[in-house]
Image (tube, rainbow, N blue to C red):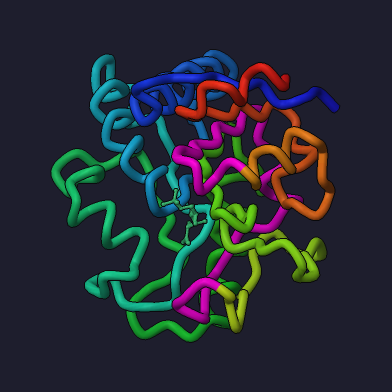
Amino acid sequence: MADPTVVISDAPVEEAARQVVAAVDDALGRRSTARLAVAGGSAARALGYVRRVLHDGDRWARVALTWVDERCVAFDDPDSNRGGAYRDGHLDDVDPPGDELALVRDGEAPPAAVARVADALAARFDNALDVTLLGMGPDGHIASLFPGRRFDDSSIVTHVANSPKPPPDRLSLTRPLLATATRHVLLATGEGKRAALERLLDGDRALPAAGLDGLVIVTDLTDLGARS
Ligand code: 6PG
């Protein structure tokens, strides 16, 4: 298990996007499609840069996109990760990726969503990812995997009920699926993320990002890199 790499940047969103593009290009050197899973929040902002760069050379048409987690709300709800990415212009209906798998559809109950997504991940993603673009909460969560909770490692996608971060119902990819990716780009900026990043760099196994091979942390915390 390799230690995480820390990349300090004063333009962390763009740097995270650059790292993702490089990893997608690497995957496209080996496969016909690159399977990319993206978080909501600040990570979604990097997705717009990724889309625009990959559009050149038609590489975006070879990306199979999904989400590392989604809130169980309608697309139009302000809490929808996917809805927010489209509303904020990071994704665009007129410039779709080659494939996009939504974790939650309007009106879909969580168990039905889990079953549909598990089937789609098998059929369209071969139950694996190439690249993840992650965010991390101040508590150290990635996707909707919260430290202190038992991680469901028996399936590749799970319903998270009673999430400590609202809204309470979510779908999340689990660590077994996330760990299939060979590159994880974790965008974490601001002092609020420092404690969680330090725990991660210390290898705190309570954090779901601990132990992910190929982890690149992109941050604006200038003194963090001295630790790695
Ligand atoms: C969610 C997100 C979540 C997010 C982190 C970090 O739906 O809650 O996917 O996992 O990535 O909370 O968010 P920020 O980068 O916006 O702080």
Provide residue 28's location: percent of width, then percent of height: 50, 20
Residue at image location 72% in from the left, 62% down from the top: 147
Residue at image location 64% in from the left, 63% down from the top: 157
Left of 92 or right of it: where is 156?
Answer: right
Residue at image location 55% in from the left, 36% down from the top: 186
Provide residue 1's location: percent of width, then percent of height: 85, 27
Residue at image location 61% in from the left, 81% down from the top: 161
Magenta stretch contains residue 73: no
Asked where in the image residue 197 lies, by quadrant, the reply is: top right
Provide residue 90's location: percent of width, then percent of height: 24, 43
Left of 9 or right of it: where is 139?
Answer: right
Residue 132 is at least partly visible in this image: yes
Asked where in the image residue 153 lies, by quadrant, the reply is: bottom right
> Looking at the image, is 5 positioned above or below residue 123?
above
**Which segment did they paint magenta?**
165-194
> Looking at the image, is 101 positioned above or below residue 170?
above
Magenta stretch contains residue 176: yes
